[in-house]
């Protein structure tokens, strides 16, 4: 999936660490807790963290009323890509590495899943079968949150989502003056589907840096199927889980169900609404079958 525009520079993983010309970082025992190998952290994620920190330092200084905990505007880092491509894993790894390098930073990870319409509303709108598509999100709610985050030092209340019940919860989460917000979701590069004109602000307008995770679709489908089977297995002990409805299926039947959902919902969404916009990202990370990064692409100035 190298179909990027000509203003991207491609670089192999083993060359990126050398070319980025950064000193090795100390991460201590947290390396044992991260899903990536130490080699991948050194060759890919450490140079990326240094790039993020450099961009943060170049940000214009805000008015005093807008200052975060470190005295600067929140740096918003976007992580996007298709369902099951590993957005949450990459977001959490970058958070831990940022905190290890700059312990005084306040870093929050937030998923746009919380801004999905509730299942009840999706049913009322007749679009439950398009959950995850652009029209299933409260897009303006995300934009208003980002505007407030960039312009106000007040606490922000955001909705939360449960992957157990497969629905938005009634709980709210408080985001308070983070130095870095890592925003992950399917729709970071998309425009508001309800906007009458293109002058309305888009999520992308608020991202200081955006990373797109790319992989062969067959690999992403395999990862989705594995996650689906794992959720079904866990749901056998939890009647409140959305996936409990699949608990009586055999593994093969559950696998076929997952593939059907992929082909009806996730694959079309990836092809129609997510992958075509990857040129709007600043960085593209290419993932291999084992989730490791084997190549990178950087948008050139």
Image: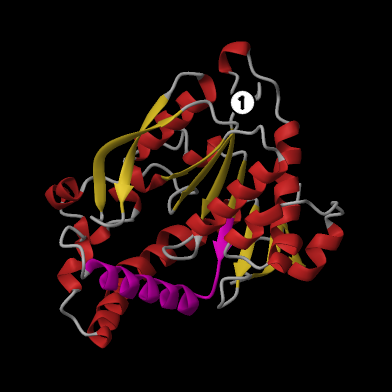
Can the viewer see residue 137? no
Viewer-proximal residue among 132 and 2: 132
The local secondary structure at tag 1 comes to loop
Please tell me whether residue 59 is drawn above or below residue 30 in the rendered image: above
In the rendered image, the residue lying farthest to the top is: 64
Give coordinates of residue 187: x percent, y percent.
Answer: 43, 50
Image position of 232 (left or right of 68): left
Q: Residue at x 31, y 78 (%)?
A: 259
Viewer-proximal residue among 181 and 35: 35
Q: Name the residue under label 1.
A: 73
What span is in magenta?
212-235
Give coordinates of residue 48: x percent, y percent.
Answer: 71, 52
Can the viewer see residue 252? yes
Image position of 57 (left or right of 164): right
Q: Which residue is drawn at 46% across and 18% down?
A: 154
Image position of 217 (left or right of 94): left
């Amino acid at each position: 999936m190298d179909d990027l525009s000509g203003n991207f520079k491609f670089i192999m993983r083993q060359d990126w660490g050398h070319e980025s010309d950064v000193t090795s970082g100390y991460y201590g025992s947290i390396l044992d807790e991260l899903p990536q190998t130490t080699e991948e952290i050194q060759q890919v994620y450490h140079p990326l963290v240094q790039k993020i920190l450099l961009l943060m330092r170049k940000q214009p200084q805000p008015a005093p009323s807008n200052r975060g905990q470190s005295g600067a505007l929140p740096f918003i880092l976007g992580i996007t890509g298709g369902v099951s491509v590993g957005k949450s894993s990459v977001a959490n790894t970058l958070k831990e590495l940022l905190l290890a390098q700059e312990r005084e930073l306040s870093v929050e990870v937030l998923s746009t899943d919380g801004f999905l319409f509730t299942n009840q509303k999706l049913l009322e709108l007749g679009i439950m079968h398009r959950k995850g598509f652009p029209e299933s999100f409260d897009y303006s709610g995300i934009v208003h949150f980002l505007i407030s985050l960039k312009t106000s030092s007040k606490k922000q209340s955001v909705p939360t989502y449960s992957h157990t019940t497969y629905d938005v919860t009634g709980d709210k989460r408080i985001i308070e003056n983070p130095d870095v917000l890592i925003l992950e979701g399917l729709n970071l590069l998309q425009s508001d589907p309800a906007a009458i004109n293109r002058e309305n602000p888009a999520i992308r307008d608020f991202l200081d840096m955006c990373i797109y995770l790319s992989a062969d679709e067959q690999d992403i489908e395999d990862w989705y199927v594995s996650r689906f089977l794992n959720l079904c297995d866990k749901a056998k002990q939890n009647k409140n889980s959305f996936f409990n409805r699949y608990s009586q299926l055999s593994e093969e039947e559950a696998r076929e169900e997952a593939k059907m959902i992929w082909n009806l919902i996730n694959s079309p969404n990836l092809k129609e609404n997510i992958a075509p916009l990857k040129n709007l990202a600043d960085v593209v990370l290419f993932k291999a079958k084992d989730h490791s990064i084997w190549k990178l692409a950087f948008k050139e100035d």
